[in-house]
Image: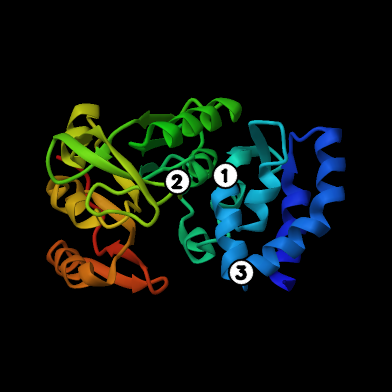
Amino acid sequence: MRYRTRLIVEIIRRLRGYTAADSIRLLLLLPFITIVSFIARRINSIRKAILRKYKSTELLDLLGKLIKSTYLKVIISKRTVLLIRSNNLQEDFSIATLMHEPFVAKVFKPGLGDVVIDVGAHIGSYTIRCAKMVGEKGIVIAFEPDPENFKMLLLNIKINDLKNVMPFPYAVSRDDGIVELHRSRFLALHSIVRMPQEYIGSINVKAITLDTMVKMLNIKRIDWIKIDVEGGEIGVLEGSTNTLKASKKIIIEVDKNDLGKVLKIAKAFGFEIKVLSENYLLLLSSQDHDFP
């Protein structure tokens, strides 16, 4: 409960966009919701009843359903905000503030003028931060195949008035074409290679390889690539033969079942491997290569 209290305090500190009526409603109902959420985690029948009504027993998601505003602003820094969905408050807030992977945020810091590729951009948590870091002379190329997440990505690019981001509603894979995106109620868990937790259906989306996109955009140098595509990371790497040759730093989420394949590919392209966490690797090029 102590963690939840700290999380609620942090949300209140960072959130903007709810009305005075929302605030009063939250304050009045917070004790009740806290108790219900606590009990629901321990009594199965109550948990099932709440799931039928709210689809979640997460305290923050229950709070989000009481807010009338569709979007809320998360204050990232003095000049940076991220819009999140009030009906997905728990997940979006955690992702927007990078609470779920601070070890990645600690090292993922491109410099002025850098070229960054964000594969699996979601609502733009890294895309927006990187765009601010690289400045007007840099560029961020962002891929997000899910329509709902892509809409949020576009809104966050717009609200931050960024001109150096190129967003694409594509999945990145080993081949160009059309693939099935298997969608989850948890909007960060969509995948083109596996059925996610809380599966809610599949849609067809366009897929492209990084090699195809980099050639199309005539990119000559790549300083950073971030790959987080819920099990599809091997496909991204296998469709990036030329791109990997010109890439300097890659942050990649790795499923334990794919670790051996990722290490093999990384070594074949001469990358030094650093472990960031149980699920993330940092690949460092031993040489700085550009495209010919």
Q: Are marks 3 and 1 in contact (CB under 8 Å)?
A: no
Contact, CB < 8 Å: mark 2 with mark 1? yes
Mark 3 lies on residue: 41
Kind of residue sitting beneath label 2: Leu
Q: Nearer the viewer, residue 203 or 213?
A: 203
Measured as percent of width and height from the top left, residue 85 is found at: 59, 38
Quarter that holds the N terminus: bottom right
Within-10-Å neighbours for mark 2: few <14, some 14–19, many 20+: some
Circle 3 or circle 1, nearest the eye: 3
Q: Amino acid at mark 1?
A: Asn
Disc number at residue 88?
1
Residue 77 drawn at (x, y percent): 68, 45
Quadrant where the image shows the C terminus = top left
Q: Secondary structure at mark 2?
A: loop
CA gap, disc 2 and disc 1: 8 Å
Task: Give the residue type that dot 3 points to.
Answer: Arg
Which residue position holds label 2?
Answer: 187
Mark 1 neighbour class, 10 Å CA radius: few under 14, some 14 to 19, many 20 or more: many
